[in-house]
Amino acid sequence: MTPRRNARATGRPARGVRPTAGRRRALGQHFLRDESIARWIVELSRPGPHDLVVEIGPGEGALTGLLAATAGRLIALEVDPALAARLRERFAAAPHVAILEADAIRYDYAGLPALRPDPAGRVLVVGNLPYSVGTAILGALLAAGPPIARVAPMEMALMLQREVAERVAAAPGSRAYGSLSVLSQMAAAVHLALSVPPGAFRPPPQVDSAVIHLRVLAASPVAVADLERFRAVVLAAFSQRRKTLANALASGLALPVELLRGLLAGTGIDPARRAETLSLAEFARLAEALPGP
């Protein structure tokens, strides 16, 4: 990318009407204002001229300018019409940047590999996810990710509420380990990369944030014949964390507890254990052992 193109891509924000404080609160928006953290987030994925980058929730563009300076193509998804309009004006002279007024939960990610500027490039997703819908956006990305990863390498660097980020990255046996951990780690290798204090944002949130780096997997780390059944088992197992695994599954799946105790014992899993102690492989064995619908 030429220096002239870089200069256009990272120009100062255009003048425009800022969204009201009430509108920002409704969308859960806290705008990143710490440039060193913004650069660190971009450095996690190292976008290059062959890569397609999708930015989620660009807001006022703290990450957008940095991403546009090195990415071969950048698509930014912004749900706030006023912010999207301002970003379109700011990047009007950068033909490789597209600012879309779109809901990241419902966006069709399946076609992203075809939008890469080079068939050898990666699909990268970067974003400061709104707290109010961060988990839902992550779920949409993880659902779309493995099929994309079978066509093109895919990585994500996402800012979330720290509590949520810790749950995504948690290991079996930890207090944070739950259904979000299991389902996320079935789709991606997860690394908790950076903690971010409230002062890095405007307005400062009342909680800490964290950045996770995810390398999306083309295939699950453990073999599962029926992903929907696996998901149902995981959600049922964690639905009542204080109960033993057998009792939680009996309640969540509407199956007799004695049947479940026998099935668990047959897979080598103690029915008295709790869901947070099971590994991905153990959840897979359990899902395979359960009777079909």
Image (spheres, grey):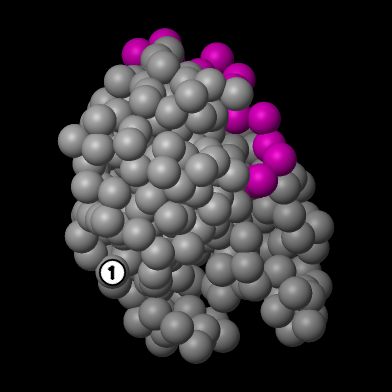
| Residue 209 part of the magenta-drawn span | no
Q: Where 92 falls versus 37 (above or below)?
A: above
* Quadrant hosting residue 96: top right
Q: Is mark 1 on a helix, strand or loop?
A: loop
Q: Where 214 falls versus 221 (above or below)?
A: below
User: In screen coordinates, is 217 left or right of 231?
Assistant: left
Q: Where 157 falls versus 175 (above or below)?
A: above
Residue 92 seen in the figure: no
Q: Where is residue 117 in the image (x, y as percent from the top left)?
A: 48, 19
- Between 139 and 265, the residue placed more toward the observer is 265
> Which quarter shows the N terminus?
top left
Q: Which residue lies furthest to the front in this view?
A: 258
> Which quarter shows the C terminus?
top right
In this figure, which residue is indicated by the disc labeled 1? 175
| Residue 120 part of the magenta-drawn span | yes
- Between 61 and 214, the residue placed more toward the observer is 214
Q: Position of residue 5 (x, y in %)?
A: 48, 39
Q: Where 84 falls versus 195 (above or below)?
A: above
Q: Which residue is drawn at 35% across and 13% down?
A: 120
Q: Residue at x 59, y 44 (%)?
A: 254
Residues rendered magenta in the picture: 104-121
Residue 224 seen in the figure: yes
Q: Which residue is drawn at 60% across and 52% down?
A: 136
Q: How crowded is mark 1: few (under 14 residues within 10 Å), some or many (20 or more)?
A: few
User: In screen coordinates, is 136 left or right of 146?
Assistant: right
User: In screen coordinates, is 136 left or right of 71?
Assistant: right
Q: Position of residue 284 (x, y in %)?
A: 33, 30
- Between 246 and 213, the residue placed more toward the observer is 246
In terms of secondary structure, what is the magenta stretch mainly?
loop
Q: Which residue is drawn at 74% across and 84% down?
A: 21
Q: Position of residue 33 (x, y in %)?
A: 46, 75
